[in-house]
Amino acid sequence: MPMTSTTNTTLLEQMHISDREIALRKRLFGFTEKDVSNLVGCREWITEHIDEIIKEVFRQRVAEPEMELVIGDHDTLERLKESTRHYILELFQGYYDEEYVNKRLRVGKVHKQIGVTPKLYMSAVWSLMSILDLSLYEMISVPDKCARHDFHNSLHKILLFDSHLVFDTYINSLTSEIISAKLEVEKYAESLEEKIVARTIQLQELALHDPLTKLLNQRAFYDNLRRELSRADRSNSSVCLVYFDLNDFKKLNDSLGHKAGDALLETVAVAMNEALRDVDLACRYGGDEFCIIMPNTEISKAISTCERLKEYFDRKTTHGITFSIGIVQSCSEKRLEMNEMIELADAKMYQAKKLSHANPGHHIEY
């Protein structure tokens, strides 16, 4: 049987790093949920000071002749600054899962390709660690040595975790024959793994769906949106997010009772399933708020889908309820982070809601 082309698989898949392996590596570094909380707690501070952090990072890097020689030119330097900016912000986002690990492996591959040696890479990690340590020291205004140690310790753990992954890619590039042998061994357990995966998928299905509407729940929404944004970034495609809620839903609950309200929410779900494509992801965000993740979709197609959704919904028993819809697109011209995209879609939805107050009916803002 011919081997799968490496261009059709991610580094994560090529190196067979599973969720279980990721969890094990975190455990080896003592990286816990407390560390996640510590890093997320620094996110706002780091975001506010990212420009000065980047400036200091590259002031130190270009001062090193060997590193300056590797960088080579201004365009490469600017691309490296932008990728470093994204990396630093990701350190404090609180998501250290498969997508995060795959990006770290890609960092290792790129560094190997452009000739960044392990000694230069570790020197850069040490420099970054020192700069971030100083920034976090300034963030903690009270003279609390224990608190500072706690935050710095969490930062050091994730940087070591990342360095571990980067060096895995170095080693993988130099020992392809060992990886081939490992793949042969793993085939022995393939049938058992498939059974475990099947059982795991069944449990995930129960955990990721809203019990009333059977749509994806909020947790699944975040996971899928982050995954689709990463996929769109890799394939240079577009993703649209539709965010809508029901106008005067509270009045319906107050007048006809929560049973009627629940029935209407189920009606919304039916209309979504009828109107959307197989690749679109219908989610109940919470209460009477819903989201649609539309991969590889331009804004015009998203608008057409929302028009179709309104038509399907209006054919049913709706008690006069209408939608306020906000649509946002992330594309090659303007890439949006997950939280930014949700906030923009929410804002567009509220703009539509203002229109519904003045002119009752369905409204779309994009």
Image (spheres, helix red, strand yellow):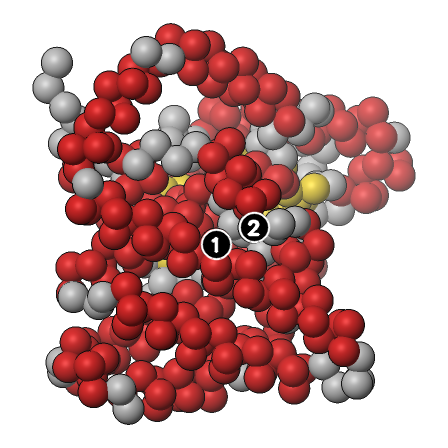
**Residue displayed at 58% across by 24% down:** 204
Contact between marks 2 and 1 (CB within 8 A): the answer is: yes
Q: Secondary structure at mark 2?
A: loop
Q: Which residue is mark 1?
A: 161
**Residue displayed at 32% across by 47% down:** 168
Residue 21 at x, y = what percent? 47, 35
Which residue, as the protein is rendered here, is positioned at the far left? 2
Q: As rendered, which of 32 and 36 lies closer to the eye? A: 32
**Residue type indicated by callout 1:** Phe
Q: Which residue is mark 2?
A: 29
Instruction: Name the mark on residue 221.
Output: none
**Residue displayed at 16% across by 33% down:** 177
Q: CA distance from mark 2 to mark 1?
A: 7 Å
**Residue type indicated by callout 2:** Phe
Q: As rendered, which of 81 and 343 lies closer to the eye? A: 81
Q: Quadrant of residue 186?
A: top left
Location of the C terminus (image quadrant)? bottom left
**Left or right: 104 in relation to 223:** left
Location of the N terminus (image quadrant)? top left
Residue 29 at x, y = what percent? 56, 50
